Image (cartoon, rainbow, N blue to C red):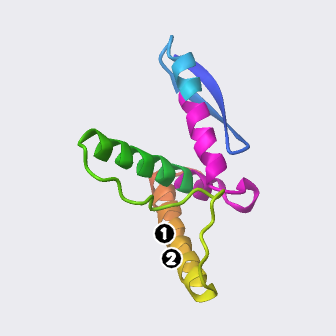
Amino acid sequence: MAQVKLEIGGRSFMVTCQDGEEDHLGKLGAMVDAKASEAGDPAGLTESRMLLFTSLLLADELHASKNAQRNEPSPQPAIPPAASPQKTNDAEDERVLLALEKLADRAEAFANSLEPKSNNA
């Protein structure tokens, strides 16, 4: 088994892969890093939230690609890239921020529940 160091959103991750898959995994990591930069400033996000928003952007792109293959009209992206903010009012911004924070908290709690429990407790 080989190990690859991936740089995503300004953070380093060591990932294990099959021998010979290092280049492919590196290319995938670069794609994820590019999407992470669309998610906004990583300094203001926890690691799990940065990865959550990045995965949502990738899922949205995959969904649009599948719709295009089926010749279905592609809906507007659910999450616009950070580089193209849309004008909204303050009340709507606050509502969206609260909803995103709740979603991120739930995703973080779920991710924590998947981590192996320490036997030191």
Residue 45 colored magenta?
Answer: yes
- Direction top: furthest residue: 20
**Amino acid, disc 1:** Leu
Q: Main secondary structure of the magenta part?
A: helix
Relative depth, front residue between 54 and 78: 78
Tag shown at residue 99:
2
Q: Are marks 2 and 1 in contact (CB under 8 Å)?
A: yes
Q: Is residue 41 above or below residue 100?
A: above
The residue to which callout 1 is attached is 103
Residue 23 place in picture, x, y as percent: 57, 17
Image position of 42 (left or right of 73): right
- On the rendered image, what quadrant is the C terminus found in? bottom right
Tell me where residue 67 appears, x and y as whole percent: 29, 47
Along the line of sight, the residue nearer the viewer: 59 or 85: 85
Q: Position of residue 36 (x, y in %)?
A: 62, 47
Q: On the image, which quarter does residue 82 sit in?
A: bottom right
Q: Position of residue 83 (x, y in %)?
A: 66, 56
Residue 47 vs 29, above or below: the answer is: below
What residue sits 60% from the left and 85% below the top? 89
Name the one closer to the observer, 78 or 111. 78
Instruction: Name the secondary structure under disc 1.
Output: helix
Amino acid residing under circle 2: Ala
Q: Secondary structure at mark 2?
A: helix
Residue 18 position (above or below residue 30): above
Q: Is residue 51 magenta?
A: yes
Start and end of the magenta stretch? 28-52
